[in-house]
Amino acid sequence: MAFFVALLLVGVYSSAAGLLGGGGGNGRLEQNSVPDEYVDLVQTWGNLCPELSPALLAAQIQQESGWNATARSHADAQGIAQFIPGTWATHGIDANGDGVADVWDPEDAIPSSANYSCSLAAQLRGVPGDPVDNMLAGYNAGPYAVIQYGGVPPFNETQHYVEVIRSAEAGFTAPAAEAEPVRLPPSHAAAAAVHFAQEQLGTPYLWGGDGGPEDDGRFDCSGLTKAAYEEVGIELPRVANDQWHAGPHPARDELLPGDLVFFAHDLNDSRSIYHVGIYVGGGYMIDAPYTGAVIRFDPIDTADYFGATRPVAR
């Protein structure tokens, strides 16, 4: 349950606006600037929110551990992203879907670093000063120090941390002539859809709800999934049994966070689909269940599980 508690406590995935770059960079890494085994992770997760970029994420990992996945500091900061145990307990995620959120596994730790940074950025929007500097300062000193001081706090360690990473960022950024627009595959773009759904946790269900002002921000099951995928520019049909046809159908053991999962009265007839949720990993989804309930985590492995769809842009 630690993974789901972490999702509940922090905005794991950032808004879809950040999927095409951020952090003042152009969204592409300089060649040979990052160890080969981490290039794809940094390139993908570094484009998670407007304040972040692959180059900025790379500079941060370089500063934190020098790409040492077994690093441990005197303060017991652990792994390639140097999470202290208390922070990892609430912000570490099982990004590679192996069932364990492992601080020593870069496939979890690098995405968790990006997710945590973007959650901080969202929390600190509106604080005076440069939003990227504020995000980095929040990572080092905590968000409440940034809020208290109205920007980067006057701590030598924090100010040095921000300056070093911002200076190093340029060395990880591909020249503009080499830059290409970043269009993430659905399995990664879906991160923003999951985040959108996660931010609705606890919202009361409303039959026919699309989340607009007239619905007081409430959703039904397919209204939630439709709104979540609008965050990444993917238009879904309005009702669940039509959403079934919005992309390919991964098998149960192929599910990734962001896949839509469906439930039906007749497991041989897609027209009998009556419910849909957004898969988050570990056999759980976020869904808007029924009148009287709230948007919540639910298991997917029930007798009426019909299958899944991985939405794609049309």
Image (spheres, rainbow, N blue to C red):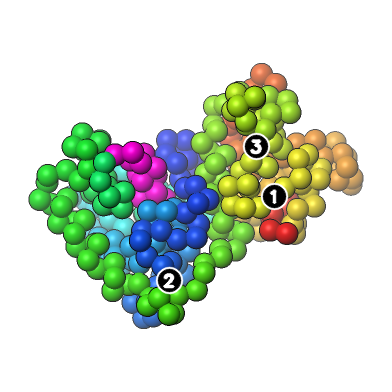
Q: Of helix, strand and loop, which one carries label 2?
A: loop
Tell me how far mark 3 sits from mark 2, CA to CA: 32 Å
The residue wearing badge 3 is 224
Tell me how far mark 3 sits from mark 1, CA to CA: 12 Å
* Of marks 3 and 1, the one in the foreground: 1
Q: Of helix, strand and loop, which one carries label 1?
A: loop
At label 1, counting other C-alpha atoms closer than 10 Å, the crowd grade (few under 14, some 14-19, many 20 or more) is: some
Measured from the top left, where is residue 164 in percent x and y?
Answer: 19, 62
* Residue shown at 41% from the left, 58% from the top: 22
Q: Amino acid at mark 2?
A: Arg
Measured from the top left, where is residue 37 in percent x and y?
Answer: 42, 74
- Corner quadrant of residue 226: top right
Residue 235 - label: 1
Above or below for 35 versus 310: below
Above or below for 31 versus 314: below
| Magenta-drawn stretch contains 65 | no
Image: magenta residue range = 114-127
Above or below for 260 versus 20: above
- In the rendered structure, the answer to whether residue 89 lies left or right of residue 73 reads right
* Residue shown at 58% from the left, 31% from the top: 296
- In the rendered structure, the answer to whether residue 296 lies left or right of residue 82 reads right
- Name the image quarter holding the C terminus: bottom right
Q: Earlier in the sequence, mark 3 or mark 2?
A: 2
Q: Amino acid at mark 3?
A: Leu
Q: Earlier in the sequence, mark 3 or mark 1?
A: 3
At label 2, counting other C-alpha atoms closer than 10 Å, the crowd grade (few under 14, some 14-19, many 20 or more) is: many
At label 3, counting other C-alpha atoms closer than 10 Å, the crowd grade (few under 14, some 14-19, many 20 or more) is: many
The residue wearing badge 2 is 28
Measured from the top left, where is residue 143 in percent x and y?
Answer: 27, 40
Q: Amino acid at mark 1?
A: Glu
